[in-house]
Amino acid sequence: MKTAKIPATNQEFPIGKIVCLARNYAEHARELGNETPAAPVLFMKPSSSVIADNGAVRIPSWSQECHYEVELAVLIGKTSRKVPVEAAMEHVAGYGVAIDMTLRDVQNQLKAKGLPWEIAKGFDSACPLSDFVPAAVIPDPHNLELRLSVNGELKQNGTSSDMIHRVPQIISYISGIFTLEPGDVILTGTPAGVGPVQAGDTMAAEISAVGRLKISVQ
């Protein structure tokens, strides 16, 4: 069982579902040729896809194009069902750094056929995830710098202020569809600059005041 840890408070949560937002940064949507959505676009990763800091992404043999996407992760701390926007932040236990690894070629093939594309997002090692900082440490999750480098070269450099759908709205929307439980994680989307990695590469992801991740690729 994978766990989400908040070292500062000695809290540990079994990770449940990982709910992810697609196209939550306009520039990223445009770089992939997608429309900007009016409502959040959701998909999921299984908890088995999580790897920790200093872990290794293992690209499946059936993909030739694996992309990185740095994202702010939101850890849910209490049961959330049909939560109003104004109360949503009370349900956040902490924030972390995630990399949403995506088999872009597989995803594009499935999308072209109108098929679900979870296998492009949920393979083993597809969700590098840091430890979390307490929610109280981050007064505004929409004022954070997100960066990702590959082999020391900066690839993504964005800010969470560019989110289309903000954290309270995201929690309210998701909890109106299905109940969020303690240990569930929300990945809030990625800024522009995504691209491929290959075996032998090293990724370094960082979100200001939240944390860092260093991940190798195999």
Image (tube, rainbow, N blue to C red):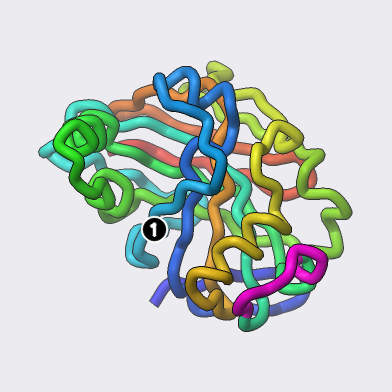
Residue 213: in magenta span:
no
For the C terminus, the quadrant is top left
> Which sits in the foreground, 168 or 205?
168
Q: Position of residue 117 (x, y in %)?
A: 25, 46
Q: Quadrant of residue 122?
A: bottom left
Is 116 left, or right, of 70 in this rendering?
left
Does the magenta portion include 81? yes
Left or right side of 76 for 174? left
| Residue of label 1 | 44
Mark 1 secondary-structure assignment: strand
Left or right: 173 in relation to 101: right
Under mark 1, the amino acid is Met
In-front residue for pair 171/74: 171
Query: Is residue 105 depicted above or below 71 in this figure?
Result: above
Q: Position of residue 143 (x, y in %)?
A: 81, 39
For label 1, the crowd category at 10 Å Cα-Cα, with few meaning under 14, some 14 to 19 and many 20 or more, is some
In the picture, residue 120 is in which quadrant? top left
Say if residue 70 shows up in the picture.
no
Q: Is residue 24 above or below residue 125?
A: above
Q: Nearer the viewer, residue 51 or 146?
A: 146
As drawn, is 214 to the left or to the right of 140? left
- Which quarter of the rendered picture does the N terminus lie within? bottom left
Residue at figure coordinates x 68%, y 56% from the top left: 169
| Residue at x 24%, y 31% (from the top left corner) | 108
Residue 218 appears in the rendering: yes
Task: Report the residue at 40% width, 38% height from top.
Answer: 216
Look at 82% across and 65% down and name the residue there: 86
Q: Report the magenta residues as a range.
A: 80-88
Residue 12's spot in the image, x, y percent? 61, 78
